[in-house]
Amino acid sequence: MVTGTMDYFDPKSISEAISILSKWGERARIIAGGTDVMVDMKHKEEPVCLVNIKRIPNMSYIKEEGGGLRMGPLTTIREIETSRLVRERFPVLWEASRQFASLQIRNTATIGGNICRASPSGEMLAPLLVLEAKARIVLPDGERIVPFDTFFIGPGKTVLGSNGLLKEIEIPTPPKESCSIYLKHAVRGAMDIAIVSVAVLVTSDSKESSANDVRIGLGAVAPTPIRAKKAEAILRGKSFEQRRIGETAIEAAAEAQPITDQRGTAEYRKWIVEALIRRGLNETWKAKARKGRS
Amino acid sequence: MESKSQEGKVLMMIKINLTVNGKRKTVDLEPSLSLMDFLRDTLGIKGVKVCCNIGECGACTVLLDGKLVNSCVVLAADAADCQIVTVEGIAEGDKLHPVQEAFIERGAAQCGYCTPGFIMVGKTLLDQNPTPTLEEIKDFIYGNICRCTGYTKIIEAIQVASKQMEGKGGQP
């Protein structure tokens, strides 16, 4: 509820932002695009202090560097969607950006906001996990790099705590012999939060008969986005065949820890994980075979 | 900008400059104000509709520096030094924009509540892609919800406006 007594800061540098967050701690709320924070402010609770980080320069960019991608946290989802670089080299992330909410939201929402909101069903998160992306973060005691698979610690909770800032997203280029897919299961074709989302990245050998590496990311089925590591191990280094794909899908479903909520039961979600992993592995395998032939 | 002491009850205000429908303005804002509430309540621009108020229906859609946004989830303070265009700003004097004309001609409004949002989206689509296919139209407008029309007439209106803007006449 808007009360009119909120404090407001728009720092012009990361260090200024960190110092404000150090002083205000839990009472401060960072706003990037605002598509989540504005809803909270109006319908849940107005923060004591709002910290608008959009005046910090050089936080919105997509650039190729050192064999991978570096992305500023204030890059909008629409900028990701319209980036040829992301579409061609990081298609699993691009596909997630395409399915994110609506055009109006994508023009406003930022990838940093989606990450730091740390919703278990955050659209961009399972792709970041399978791309083995890393977060460059700033805390009062300095800067460090945190792989995304240890960045999320619970629903709405990250290693940033209440006084850290996400400075950059680093995404290594996936191996040349890899194929990926992002699949989102939702009720509607538009504007829906995922009931289940999966990101699959498969690297195969030159004969496309076996999987050198398998990465499976699951969204909306655990307190955080997760990698289904036991499932990956079933297929990694082994040949693609339906029976093994099926076992991998079943194990991925077992690794999911979904809840029952208004979008679906836990049982349904596990069922969908299995179906989407089976589909995802088959699609990436087929796509790899097509690539190999061209 | 003034910051207040924690004990004081002084209302904190931010001063911004912006352009709204071609008119430059300098205003003082409460920091928590949304762009939607600013346009409607501070500037009296009522073509921006309040509907879901959580960024999901598109009724409050405006153009912010040429980009379609849900103004209910944009901070008014973030419109500083920006150009805002609402449905009130797309006609040229008395001459309605072709998308507005087409909505009238095709009967694409029933209650009319979603209409300003759809008109902003339709206009922006045709500015970027003058001859969209049916799929391209649907792909562009899906952030806007209509509870009355079933979307058929809205899509027809956009197709008619497309032909009109291409100079091919108004017949679908």
Image (cartoon, helix red, strand yellow):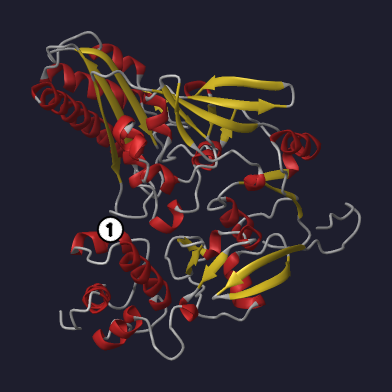
Residue in the image at 37% along x and 55% along y: A191
Residue in the image at 61% along x and 81% along y: B44
Return the residue nearer the eye: A1 or B9. Answer: B9
Residue in the image at 36% along x and 52% along y: A192
Q: Position of residue A248 (x, y in %)?
A: 23, 20
Q: Position of residue A78 (x, y in %)?
A: 42, 48
Q: Position of residue A127 (x, y in %)?
A: 37, 31
Residue with the mark numbered 1 = B139
Q: Chain of mark 1?
A: B
Quarter that holds the N terminus of chain B: bottom right
| Disc 1: CA contacts within 10 A as few (<14), some (14-19) or many (>=20) | few
What amino acid type is highlighted by mark number 1? Asp
Which quarter of the picture shows residue A279? top left
Which quarter of the picture shows residue B105? bottom left
B6 shown above or below B20: above
Specify the farthest residue to the front. Answer: B167
Tell me if A221 is positioned left or right of A51 in this view.
Answer: left
Residue in the image at 54% along x and 64% along y: B72
A292 shown above or below A12: above
